[in-house]
Amino acid sequence: MSTVIYPGSFDPCTNGHLDIIRRASKIFEKVIVAVLCNSSKAPLFSAEERVQFIKDAAKDLPNVEITSFSGLLVDFAKKNNAKIVIKGLRAVSDFEYEFQMALTNHNLCRECETIFIPASAEYMFLSSSIVKEIASYDGDLTGLVPPDLVPVLRHRFGFC
Amino acid sequence: MSTVIYPGSFDPCTNGHLDIIRRASKIFEKVIVAVLCNSSKAPLFSAEERVQFIKDAAKDLPNVEITSFSGLLVDFAKKNNAKIVIKGLRAVSDFEYEFQMALTNHNLCRECETIFIPASAEYMFLSSSIVKEIASYDGDLTGLVPPDLVPVLRHRFGFC
Amino acid sequence: MSTVIYPGSFDPCTNGHLDIIRRASKIFEKVIVAVLCNSSKAPLFSAEERVQFIKDAAKDLPNVEITSFSGLLVDFAKKNNAKIVIKGLRAVSDFEYEFQMALTNHNLCRECETIFIPASAEYMFLSSSIVKEIASYDGDLTGLVPPDLVPVLRHRFGFC
Amino acid sequence: MSTVIYPGSFDPCTNGHLDIIRRASKIFEKVIVAVLCNSSKAPLFSAEERVQFIKDAAKDLPNVEITSFSGLLVDFAKKNNAKIVIKGLRAVSDFEYEFQMALTNHNLCRECETIFIPASAEYMFLSSSIVKEIASYDGDLTGLVPPDLVPVLRHRFGFC
Amino acid sequence: MSTVIYPGSFDPCTNGHLDIIRRASKIFEKVIVAVLCNSSKAPLFSAEERVQFIKDAAKDLPNVEITSFSGLLVDFAKKNNAKIVIKGLRAVSDFEYEFQMALTNHNLCRECETIFIPASAEYMFLSSSIVKEIASYDGDLTGLVPPDLVPVLRHRFGFC
Amino acid sequence: MSTVIYPGSFDPCTNGHLDIIRRASKIFEKVIVAVLCNSSKAPLFSAEERVQFIKDAAKDLPNVEITSFSGLLVDFAKKNNAKIVIKGLRAVSDFEYEFQMALTNHNLCRECETIFIPASAEYMFLSSSIVKEIASYDGDLTGLVPPDLVPVLRHRFGFC
């Protein structure tokens, strides 16, 4: 009954994203991770790759489904009979942007609610951008992304 | 199954609090509103009064239970077999304090999760303190608190 | 005598911008809305179009003049014998950027003062970017921009 | 015609407050500085003293009037046929509190508008509390308050 | 040569404070921890107790000296021939207050510099107030304060 | 012994950067200014030019060394036997980004510490971007950059 959508670019997913997915899967009956594929910025990984990375990392969580979407989040939510969107919250800058999106989505669809899950302390300052910057100089990614992603990222940046 | 606790001082409850209660009652199976009665500050209303105000205002919501508690929130949560705490989020200052409390509670009880529900735009800047300040000068409380509370507040501040 | 300048990209103007214009027109004798046409980002609408949209939406306000400018705001202000700049303030991130610009302009021209008008609660999280993102997926723009702009935006994004 | 109210505790006024008064007196036709005398906290100086300090420091500004008030600001504004409230803005924490008050006052009186004047860079972090803390240890107050106030503050804290 | 002062109330010291002390002792030649004893608020522990707690917890750090002071920090700094003040930084609200104090101290003594050391992720949301609140309900203090302080706090709150 | 690294883009250096360099040179034995040359954004000035500008402006500071680097900051720090990174802190948005970088670097190298030096009040809102924007319209750069840089910037933007 209580299905939630966890939307994002996940380019790529970090251990912070997976922590949110894991915790959400204990709170809600079903979690749909929705990989946004119409971002204007050119992503590092294709939507298919990004979906697969999360599928691999979350394969032990039976009530988590991973898919991609394009268009407005509220339209995706309606199609999936889900009214609740979850977002992780890290720093204050997150907060303002996410508030703006939550109110915008609520405006577009009165039944759509967004709720926020605070990042765990150890992931408070982790982001996909930081991961990509470190990877681009072949820095140590241990603990930042799922172990299987480390060689994938090194390869993508030409280090093996 | 998914029982959540909504703790607070609620001295008194505002329409912003009631908006959070109403929206939470649609998302979760059971909402326990927990009126904190061990605040160090002397409250304007007794815990019993504060519980009753919310009971009156939320009487049409069958899955909402209102009670008071003292002591640590995590102990109250354990006693009620609830692991999820909800908090409304308004401005940035809220955000930091609530983050601190969420991490502290998570530290005290690893299973305890806090999730945040953003205030609706019209209640973004409403608080119990503002209500009390306006009431103390017999200002207009329409739209800020449940209608039944208006004469109670006026009386408490000696205006009738 | 008290002429103020309200500068911005207005690409396109939103109901939040028009709310600021309307309120400023009641406070000050003359309001010059100044559409910036030298932004480095490629705008969705030309400066002429952006000026015209505001002219249409504010045509009932006799003390509001709409024009475009390029170059430094302080130079435009001097040319128009105006020393007061007004800016709308929404969230905290606005605040810091606008503070920086206000101090910079004051540095460039000691007589130039910037004053801030807080967004109304219902427009606190509305921006031109959000409008464009919603429009790009043919989402509902009701209440976000002047009614006449809705078909214009739909057309620009290829939906009619 | 354009009369503005500048409310505050001014316990005591600082050079930051006087900077706002001076700048506002150039923008608006009349500035009413309104010293709040119903603050719940015990002030260091009486309302009469606080009014007099500002009168002394602003005596060269003919369009500035200093008075005290108690009760709701919107009631004071109505009595004085003034619809515009000005507030200085320093740091982010100011911003949120002042936003809350601006929206609350607008709610109590639809015609009441609050506009913000950013603190000058050199007064960005000056406050009455800081002044009182420094004065309580007989620290150097030069540049923080009007020169005439320095011996008054020293005397109040028992240093002469 | 590079002596720094780390001022604070430390009522009581937390593991967050000790983390800052430990890290500062590796960066600077001498660290003077300065326990403020003229705070207006009644402390839970006397200045002597607070000094002793830090002495016990930092006894393995030879270049750390713990003492108490009253009055203005800049006067204490001058007396100790130290020009550098260090402060831990946690959340945004810290940041603004500490900035204000840093600029105020720099104003009072041009040679006085304040530098900030960011809290470690695990202590980002830990404070003396939180510790006291948890202790007042006999909550678990493990990991929040030095082990020796746990029974002291329990005793102070009447739990043994 | 206590060598610190001050990394940045410095495109170009501002008087705010030089203020940090000057103050840091009084606190630490050696300051290595490290001009980042692998930024993804196309810089206005080459790394060589940026290094030279700082060399010219800081030539009276014998314990300051200016160099460029690419790659991860922690790798550069290791190569230079430096464990301490300094960063200037201006507004709140700085704060969050810098915190993220500090924690990330600490994660990549446990011995690496970042400490923050608050901007002086007069440079609180100065940045390289603001300088470039003003220069692009031939605005007055006095007091924002070292005097020698003014004609260089004017020339780069085609004004002489």
Image (cartoon, coloured by chain):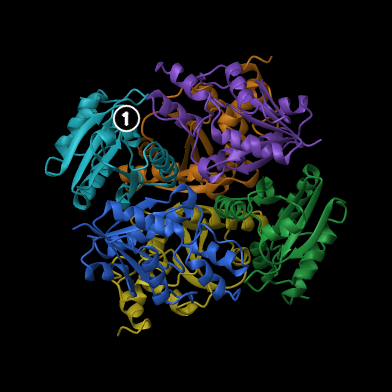
Chain colours: A blue, B cyan, C yellow, D orange, E purple, F green
Name the foreground residue: D78 vs C100.
C100
Q: Quadrant of residue B17?
A: top left
| Residue D149 sits above or below residue A98 on the image | above
- Name which residue type carries label 1: Tyr
Report x, y in % for residue D108: 31, 42
Coordinates of residue F143 in the picture (x, y in percent) = 75, 56
User: Which residue: 59% across, 26% down?
Assistant: D132
Q: Pinpoint residue F84: horizontal percent, then vertical percent.
A: 71, 49
Q: Image check: A29 left or right of A120?
A: left
Question: For the point 57% across and 67% down, which residue is it?
Answer: A135
Q: Does residue E157 appear in the picture of this structure?
A: yes
Please state the chain letter of the residue tagged with numbered disc 1 in the rendered image: B
Locate residue D151, reporting x and y percent.
Answer: 67, 21
Relative to E24, C34 lies left or right = left
Mark 1 crowdedness (10 Å alpha carbons): few <14, some 14-19, many ≥20: some
Pick the residue in front: E97 or C38: E97
Q: How many marks?
A: 1
Kindly identify which residue carries mark 1: B137
Q: Secondary structure beneath disc 1?
A: loop
